[in-house]
Amino acid sequence: MQTYIIATAYFFFIVQLLIITRSFFYARRERNARRPDYTPKAAIIAPHYGWDADTAEHVKGLLHQDYAGAYEVFFVTHQKADSGHDVSYPHLCEIAEPHPNIHVLLAPNIVDNNLPRSQKVQNLITVIERLPDDIEVIAFVDADVAIREDWLTLLVNPLQASDIGTTVGGRFYFPQTWNIASLVESIWVNFQMSVQGDHPFTMVWGGSNAFRREMLEKAQILERWDQATIEDLNTTLAMRDVKHKIHFVPDCVAVTHTANRTWHQIAEFTNRQMIMTFHMGLWRQWLASLVVCLPKGIFVFGSIPFLFHRRELLPVIFILFLEALSYRLYSKNLPRWLQNMPKVRQTIGISSYVTSVGVFLAGLNAVYAIFQRKITWGGVRYEILSATKCRVLGAVKRKQKDNA
């Protein structure tokens, strides 16, 4: 029996290692690729909810993109019955005022207006319906991420290939404090970049992606979004329907600084992500978490209580150290500018010791998603009915801002 346990645990670890290795080769090919300049007029859409000092800095990063073509930025937030608008609205208006290519829009509140979609989707639709006719490429970025000056250039350039429907960047969680919950969350999020590439597991992430405007009609994106909970997973499915590639750009990484995350926050965030993945029909991604992450975690952590009586199980526990090494190996695939950021290497080293916990959590999320359709996001409760339909259950009181 113990031989079976050890062999199974190592088998799934090897599968995980092969995925990381494949990501290495893809990133190397992509970084060596040479393409002609492609700088169509672009629109950057940045939905907002809440405001803090980090958000203000992130906004400024959009104002000075090193992009050879013309671009316009559209900040959008939503109305609120009590104050008239989200707290971010006056801050965005003040920042945008001196810049003629920066616009701030106010979307209707979905709860107050009984609209059949999530607030983020409504915000995006509000902007897209008002885009100038000369916009050729639409890029999306979340409010809680920091981007570099070349972000727009990196996302737009590959779109010159007709078979590429969408480009997507990576997201990197950078814990500013080393409490275990924050470190586990960073593992859960950061490891997702290792499954992005040029294969069917590649997904669109709403926090950093772009597509040609023509895809709105060709892939019927707005039709898919009309009653949807989330836009990025629907864009993923839309690109598959029209047989266009989702192209991952390994050097286009957006950074989220996190601090003092609680286990409750992490459980809500990770469960929400997996619930959406499962009930929107992204079976490959959900099944990978269930089949690879869950059994290995059960065998590894389930063996710990028996170590004093069954020393032959020690090789299973060694996987904890191997996974720590695999996370450090994965980090070598990050852009050089990110690896050179102060404290990043040190934080990666500390985080690596809880790699197995983060991976096992993904497996637990996959199981939980089977039994739950309701999520709380941005202060609103939703029930996911299908990939393209949701039920808005109403607003909930929140003490802290949700993770995007």
Image (cartoon, rainbow, N blue to C red):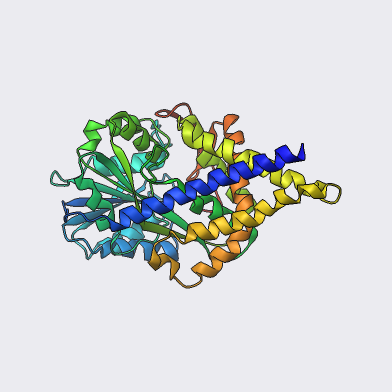
Is residue 271 shown left or right of residue 57? right
Q: Is residue 95 above or below residue 84?
A: below
Up/down of 60 relative to 126, above or below: below
The reply to whether residue 57 is in sight is: yes
Q: Depth check: 284 or 224 in front?
A: 284
Residue 42: percent from left, percent from top: 20, 51
- Which of the 4 image quadrants contains residue 87? bottom left
Image quarter hosting the N terminus: top right
Front-most of 235 and 359?
Answer: 359
Q: Is residue 163 left or right of residue 362?
A: left
The percent coordinates of residue 300 (x first, y second) are 70, 46
The residue sitting at the bottom extreme is: 342
- Please report the residue visible at 32 percent of the width from the left and 53 percent of the height from the top: 29
Instruction: Please give left or right for residue 52 compared with residue 246 in the image.
Output: right
Q: Is residue 192 visible?
A: no
Q: Is residue 109 left or right of residue 218?
A: right
Q: Position of residue 369 (x, y in %)?
A: 57, 34
Residue at position x 45%, y 46% in the image: 195
Residue 86 x/y as whole percent: 40, 51
Extreme residue toward the right, this view: 309
Label count reads 0
Residue 258 higher or lower than 296, as above or below: below
At 48% across and 37% down in the image, what residue appears? 285
